Image (tube, rainbow, N blue to C red):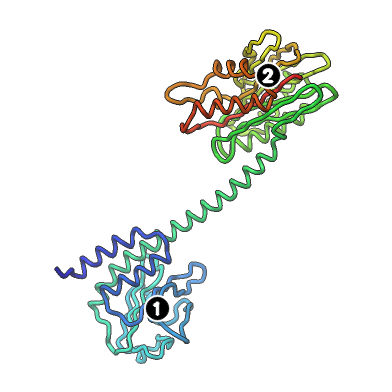
Amino acid sequence: MVRGPAAILYDIGKETSSILDLDLLLHRVAELVKRVIDYEMFGILLVDPGTGDLVLRESVQYGGAQERYRIKAGEGLSGAAVASKEPVLVNDVHADSRYLSLIAETRSELVVPLVHKDKVVGVFDLESTALGAFTEEHVKVLTPLASQVASAIENARLYEELRTRDILRAREMKIAAGIQRGLFPEDCPRGGGWEASAHFRPARELGGDLYDFYEMEEGQFGVVVGDVAGKGVPAALYGAFASGTVRSRAFERHSPAGLMARVNRTLRRRGVEGLLCNLVYARFDLRSKTVTLASSGLPHPLHYHAATGRCVPIDIGGLPLGAFDTASYEEQTLALEPGDVFVFYTDGLVDAAADGEDFGIARVRALVEAHAGLPATGLGDRILDDFDAFMKDTEHPDDLTVVVVKIL
């Protein structure tokens, strides 16, 4: 059965609407138009949004030595079609003053504008070596096709723009993630009488968790682990601000509770509405064999007592930083013994769930008790290995940080 022009146009419209690569789309359109009109020379020129010029993007048996890839806005029959948003049909080009003599063999020409939402995005340009080669019937066939193609072109351009944005965003996020990693201290810091390890896994390219170590006067060092409410870029920026604020205060010899109060006031004055930070700050003093901690709501740190072989939570809490101007904080001081281990973590560890079950604090305590003899790095790795085995292929929606400190 012979298919009529309307059926062919329907097929063409359906096919072109699914092509999102602009060059492939234009090449395919040139092939499909041949099914409707047996042209000799055919070109698709698109409007340059910056200059209004028409730029040749696809041609079939079109031109030669005199071929022009750019026609200035308003020039020639193509420019006239763009200006009027109507087809231009000329039976004898040499009798029309608007004609640009680009191809010596051309005798007749049909230009059909590609109009999308009242904006001309380009033209079909058909030329022939015969006089009167094109008719009003050709105009009737090509006009609806031009409309379909104009829409497909805009879709392809939009897709390319979005793809370019996505590529640029991915590149920027990769750079930002590298910068964030650079803001963190080394993964396995150590000093006289202590060693530590740190693991950070953002849920996205950037995360809102933070950690840091501060070597102060001899025999003293500080550790902070925190979690900003939120994910992605805002949380990462706020986390960097909070971490920098803690660092600037850590060397001023404030008590942990006093440090928390000062950091809270800074975040309240210069913070962002809706962003809060939970963190634990611990100051270790190996000379007095004590550690003093204050918290703004991070999950309870774990303390493994080498003398008893038991791992217990340190029951200390507080209001999130940045929540209230007058917030005050409590602190606890604990004795240190050789072999003691402290595990600081964000809720991304214990609240992670797979098959309806949380990873949970009890599992972490059991792991610490079973492997407390490992170096800090080995214990941190073991916790994360068990976490991965528990989660299997389950997607983890939250940032995760684990910091292990071991007294030698």
Name the residue beneath numbered marker 1: 78
Residue 354 in the figure: left or right of residue 271: left
- Residue 60, how many percent across, how many down? 38, 78
Q: Nearer the viewer, residue 199 or 121?
A: 199
Query: Gap between marks 1 and 2, in whole Å?
Result: 81 Å
Q: Residue at x 27, y 79 (%)?
A: 38
Q: Is residue 339 above or below residue 14?
A: above
Q: Is residue 383 left or right of residue 248?
A: left
Q: In this image, 332 relative to 69: left or right?
A: right
Find disc 2 in the rendering and name its residue: 373
Task: Name, please, the residue furthest toward the top.
Answer: 308
Q: Is residue 117 visible?
A: no
Pick the quarter of the image with the N terminus: bottom left
Name the residue furthest left: 1
> In this rendering, is residue 43 above or below 395?
below
Three-letter code, disc 2: Gly
Q: Earlier in the sequence, mark 1 or mark 2?
A: 1
Q: In the figure, residue 178 lies in which quadrant?
A: top right
